[in-house]
Image (spheres, helix red, strand yellow):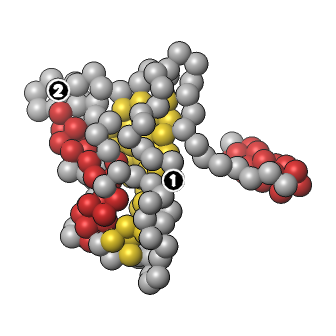
């Protein structure tokens, strides 16, 4: 299975290189899905980096039964957002990251009937990249009350869902 995946990825990269096309990860509306939120700006209004970028993250959000996909970027130099950041309140997100070393240390909690009641909210946010020298690869969900609390702490970064 890994060989098949690697072969497909390599083939796609070669076709892209040969055709001279670039691959752009944009908001994709699946047929029947509600339109993507206009809350995620497409262009960066943040300054070009003049110092070191210590956080560079990609945030992908999957919403609803049809999984509407929204992808955003966050780049920080200290507690200040820089281009190509394109999330609302990116400066607040960078300040949140700068203020917490264990911000992305989170594991999804299974739904149970006692403490983590199901919310019926089918939203997933994947965050990956690097932050302050650490590799980040974490998922957040709003599927139960426990996971929703973890999500709410990161609203400046992953949005309200």
Question: In the rendered image, which residue does mark 2 sit on?
Answer: 117
Inspect this view and state whether residue 7 appears. no
Q: Is residue 66 left or right of residue 152?
A: right
Closer to the N terminus: mark 1 or mark 2? 1
Q: Secondary structure at mark 2?
A: loop
Residue plotted at (25% across, 44% down): 151
Marks 1/2: CA–CA distance: 38 Å
* Residue 41 location (% of width, % of height): 45, 47
Q: Is residue 146 above or below residue 33?
A: below
Residue that sits furthest to the bottom in the current view: 51
Residue plotted at (89% across, 55% down): 18
* Residue 90 location (% of width, % of height): 34, 59
Q: Is residue 139 above or below residue 122?
A: below
Q: Nearest the camera: 142 or 43? A: 43
Residue 98: which quarter of the image?
bottom left
Residue plotted at (85% across, 55% down): 20
Q: Is residue 160 left or right of residue 71?
A: left
Question: In the rendered image, which residue does mark 1 sit on?
Answer: 43
Residue plotted at (46% across, 21% down): 34
């Amino acid at each position: 299975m890994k060989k098949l995946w690697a072969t497909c990825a390599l083939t796609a990269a070669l076709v892209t290189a040969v055709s001279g096309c670039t691959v752009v990860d944009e908001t994709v509306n699946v047929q029947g899905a509600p339109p993507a939120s206009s809350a995620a700006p497409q262009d960066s209004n943040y300054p070009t980096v003049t110092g070191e970028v210590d956080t560079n993250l990609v945030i992908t959000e999957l919403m609803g039964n049809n999984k509407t996909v929204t992808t955003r970027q966050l780049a920080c130099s200290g507690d200040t957002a820089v281009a190509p950041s394109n999330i609302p309140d990116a400066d607040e997100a960078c300040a949140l990251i700068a203020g917490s070393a264990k911000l992305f240390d989170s594991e999804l909690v299974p739904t149970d009937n006692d403490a983590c009641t199901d919310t019926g909210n089918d939203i997933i946010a994947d965050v990956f990249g690097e932050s302050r020298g650490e590799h980040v690869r974490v998922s957040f969900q709003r599927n139960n009350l426990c996971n929703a609390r973890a999500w709410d702490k990161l609203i400046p970064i992953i949005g309200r869902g």
